[in-house]
Structure formats: C-alpha cells, structure tokens
Image: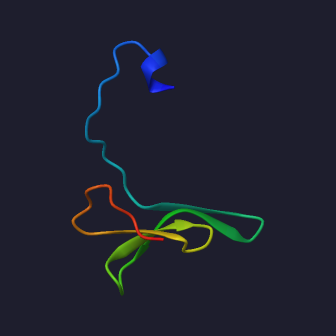
Amino acid sequence: MLSQLDDVQFCDISVRPFQIQIDGVNFGLVADDDHGCVHLQPGSQITFMEPWDGEYYT
C-alpha cells in the first residue's frame, strides 16, 4: 500500500500518554509509573517501554 503513495517520508513522531473513559472502559496510551511503561488500552496486550524507540511487547 505504501508503494502506491507519492513522496512518503519516514520520521520520528512525538506522542504522550492520554486516556478517555467511554461507557466505563478506558481507552488510550496509559502510563504505568510503577513499571515505567505505557499500555495501549483497553487491555494491556501491547506495552511500550524505554528506550521509546517504537519497540513494543505483547
């Protein structure tokens, strides 16, 4: 699909933790300060940890 796009540029992006609750369910990138990581919610199936280079853990 990317090959069909013109002038694609890959670069670093900045994101920050956030969360919103909808119908009692948390959604977002939720910081876990106790473990020094960020979970993609809902669920903790995808976790991001330092060095914050795009790697994730499932």
- Residue, far top: 6
**Residue at x 35% of width, y 81% of height:** 33
Quadrant assignment, res 16: bottom left
The type of colouring in the image is rainbow
**Which x, y percent locates residue 46?**
49, 67
Farthest-out residue, right: 23
Residue 52 sits above or below residue 4 on the image: below
Among the 4 quarters of the image, the one containing residue 26: bottom right
Placement of 47 over or under 4, stated as above or below: below
Camera-nearest residue between 36 and 4: 4
Query: How many discs appear?
Result: 0
Between 51 and 5, the residue placed more toward the observer is 5
Position in image of residue 5 (x %, y %): 45, 16
**13 and 17: which one is in front?**
13
- Residue at 43 percent across and 20 percent down: it is 3
Return the residue found at the far bottom: 34
Q: Where is residue 31, by image quadrant?
A: bottom left
In the rendering, at what x and y percent does residue 37 appear?
36, 74
> Measuring 54% from the left and 74% from the top, which residue is drawn there?
44
Residue under the image location 57 percent in, 66 percent down: 41
**Relative side of 8 to 52, left or right:** right
